[in-house]
Amino acid sequence: MSDVDGTVDVNLVLRSTRVVTPEGTRAATVAVAHGRIAAVGPYDAEVPAGARLEDFGDDALLPGLVDTHVHVNDPGRTAWEGFWTATRAAAAGGITTLLDMPLNSLPPTTTVGHLRTKQDVARPKAHVDTGFWGGAIPDNVKDLRPLHDAGVFGFKCFLSPSGVEEFPELDQEQLARSMAEIAGFGGLLIVHAEDPHHLASAPQRSGPKYADFLASRPRDAENTAVEGLIAHAERLNARVHVLHLSSSDALPLIAAARRRGVAVSVESCPHFLTLTAEEVPDGATEFKCCPPIREAANQDLLWQGLADGVIDCIVSDHSPCTTDLKTPDFASAWGGISSLQLGLPAIWTEARKRGHTLDDVVRWMSFAPAKLAGLSDKGAIEAGRDADFAVLAPDATFTVDPAELHHRNQVTAYAGKTLHGVVRSTWLRGERIVENGNVAEPTGRLLERNN
């Protein structure tokens, strides 16, 4: 293994009885050279002279997670979050690559100039590799191709109000115009799919009752928006991705569209897959997000959608805010759940109960998000990819203490929950960046789309 292809010198060897590879979990030895995986060999492979051995025993070696849905809010709303704190939390949670959403920062990522501003802010602060989505808003169709050429991974839009005035939603005509432009250069449109008319006609009641908030964001709002999105994509031969799906009713629509050849993919999030409406206390707005956490029966169907392959990936939709914005009134409180550091153990805790394996979790949280974004160097433990890893003790447990979270405001819907899966260490391009919760200085790189 010291000279894998005749020229590559291995400097690091990682060994575990549980290495999660695309072919399945097995005992293996992973050779690293110059920050990339040189080979995945037998467990008892000889360690080359001069190479350092890290033996993780029965702890599982996973590819670093890829989170394609993170609101970093930097610059402009750095009291809510920032690249330093968000990427620290990501690293502590086993995430080695994240993509930043274009809104909640000032300026939003809607022009090339705004992208450059954000990149300049992120560059010295990124603990993990970081890329950027562009934004599609009513007046920036002319900016979409330049943003694509500048390396954004795709474009996000809203079909209902985003909650921030500098990032307005698209109506159906604007959606079609932006989608046609993006399809023209082979780009990807990612969509917050809630229909504004259904939201406007739903009962709107202020106060602390979660049932009232849930009624204000009905499933039909998602279902109708997804149906319309699919129709546009089919007509325009466009690639579209449904963000943070919470309504299981939309799954048959998506499955049928795929059978017709429509290029539609879909994600869900840890909070929809591990938390239920029945457990949300009144006034507990740390559970508020849009679309909302729905009932347990709906959650069961989302898990079935994952098992069936209709839902492609699980990403955080980390959407933080300051603690004062989480007022006890569900109508006025900021909607968003912070889970960067907790997504892996939260999902693993629920997945193992439902009979899923770490292979499944890695496919949903690493391989599929990397594939969505075209990150061919990420997402799997195989030769040629970046040496990004998370070392997980899958049978160990911990109780969530908000004070131990690295993101800026320690508001979490998971407070007090006992979760399975402790991240022992995180590795970025063959260098350990987290060990037992301690995060090293930033070494993350800024990523640009390369396909």
Image: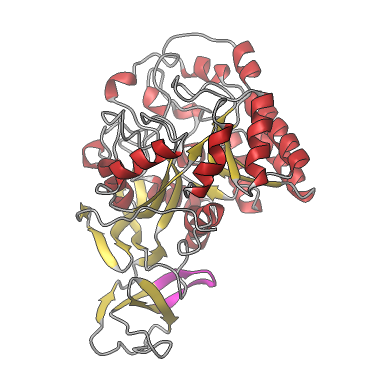
> What residue is shown at x 33% (from left), y 33% (from top)?
412
> What residue is shown at x 34% (from left), y 38% (from top)?
117
> What residue is shown at x 50% (from left), y 63% (from top)?
376
Left or right: residue 313 compared with residue 13: right
Magenta segment:
18-28
Which of 331/420 is in front? 331
- Indicate the position of residue 127 as horizontal and vertical percent values: 28, 52
- Indicate the position of residue 413 as horizontal and vertical percent values: 37, 33
Residue 251 placement: quadrant: top right
> What residue is shown at x 29% (from left), y 25% (from top)?
322
Residue 4 placement: quadrant: bottom left
Please say which color scheme the image uses. secondary structure
When the figure is inspected, residue 188 is found, relative to residue 75, above or below; the finding is below
Which of 204/283 is in front? 204
Residue 421 placement: quadrant: bottom left
- Indicate the position of residue 7 as horizontal and vertical percent values: 38, 88
When the figure is inspected, residue 360 is found, relative to residue 246, above or below; the finding is below
- Indicate the position of residue 232 as horizontal and vertical percent values: 73, 35
Q: Is residue 296 visible?
A: no
When the figure is inspected, residue 15 is found, relative to residue 223, above or below; the finding is below
Which of 412/371 is in front? 371
The quarter of the rendered structure image containing the N terminus is bottom left
When the figure is inspected, residue 366 is found, relative to residue 110, above or below; the finding is below
The quarter of the rendered structure image containing the C terminus is bottom right
Left or right: residue 356 compared with residue 15: right
Left or right: residue 31 compared with residue 274: left
Q: How many marks?
A: 0
Q: Is residue 429 visible?
A: yes
Q: Magenta segment: does it hold 339?
A: no
